[in-house]
Image (cartoon, rainbow, N blue to C red):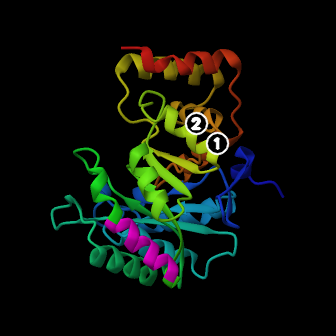
Amino acid sequence: MTLPASAAGRFTFPGTEISVNRMGYGAMQLAGPHVFGEPKDPNEARAVLREALDLGIDHIDTSDFYGPYVTNRLIAETLHPYPENLTLVTKVGGWRDDQGGWNMDHSPAFLRKSVEDNLERLKLDQIAIVNLRMGSATGFSEDSALAEPMREMRRMQEEGLIAHIGLSTVTESQIRIARDIAPVVCVQNLYNLVHRDDDAMIDSLAEQGIAYVPYFPLGGFSPLQSDELANVANELGTSPQSVALAWLLARSPNILVIPGTASRTHLRENIAAASLKLDADHLRRLNGIASIS
């Protein structure tokens, strides 16, 4: 049976046997407001996870610092034992304080403890892909800061705690440094219709068969940019979110989308983007949104 999430096609991570639908799910919004604390409706959060799998989602992105610990606990409580085709991807390099602040820590000891904690809470013996998040709210880390944590990631890979390594919030030069230390199967950065600094990076990664996983698909739009996106969505009889996701899927075959939601209604709307076809005129107008001030 063909499921809605499969309409976007599939992607195989380089050097792996892991193949996923390009329409995935990000678990961040299952936590409370500002990704902190318990969900407003825990039963709906669990229902979203179950329905995601029913609709063909086989790639879930999560992290221990969502909540903190909330999304991983919900995933394990709801979906474990996991279907064989489900790929869980987590990330390390950050932690939350008691006030919900985001803090970075790339020390080897912290990264190892983070991986061990993710394994325990997700009830896994090995995590398929772990993203090393380097950037912070204030910008990118220095290139020199990457080597030591990346070497620790490789050690954990060699020990079997993680199967494959990804990167998050990194520059092209940092990707090159990381790949000199260990293979990288995916990059997760900020990218959408108006934030297109990574255009060249995406094309380069596509040539190398490496996945690019954008976050904040609707973040940072101006009112005029939002109006043009809404106009296209109205013509297609769908939501701006669906159009933005469909544009990302059309942008490059190595792009995997992981929209998040705590609502089954929004989940269905997001997954419907996998089937949304954008014609040449729509693509031209969407490509031009970034130039609208």
Give coordinates of residue 254: x percent, y percent.
63, 45
In the image, what residue occupies the spot 51% across and 16% down?
Answer: 288
Taking 110 as reference, is 120 left or right?
right
- How many residues crowd mark 2 within 10 Å: few (<14), some (14–19), many (20+)? some
- In what element is the residue under mark 2? helix
Taking 150 as reference, is 247 left or right?
right
- In what element is the residue under mark 1? helix
Work out which residue is located at the far front of the displayed protein and give it. Answer: 180
Secondary structure, magenta segment, majority class: helix
Mark 1 and mark 2 in contact (Cβ < 8 Å)? yes
- How many residues crowd mark 1 within 10 Å: few (<14), some (14–19), many (20+)? few
Q: On the image, numbered disc 1 is attached to which residue? A: 207
Which residues are the magenta region? 148-158
Give coordinates of residue 182: x percent, y percent.
50, 65
In the image, what residue occupies the spot 60% across and 61% down?
Answer: 59
In the image, what residue occupies the spot 58% across and 50% down?
Answer: 211
Along the viewing direction, whichever of 8 and 229 lies nearer the viewer:
8
Label drawn at residue 203: 2
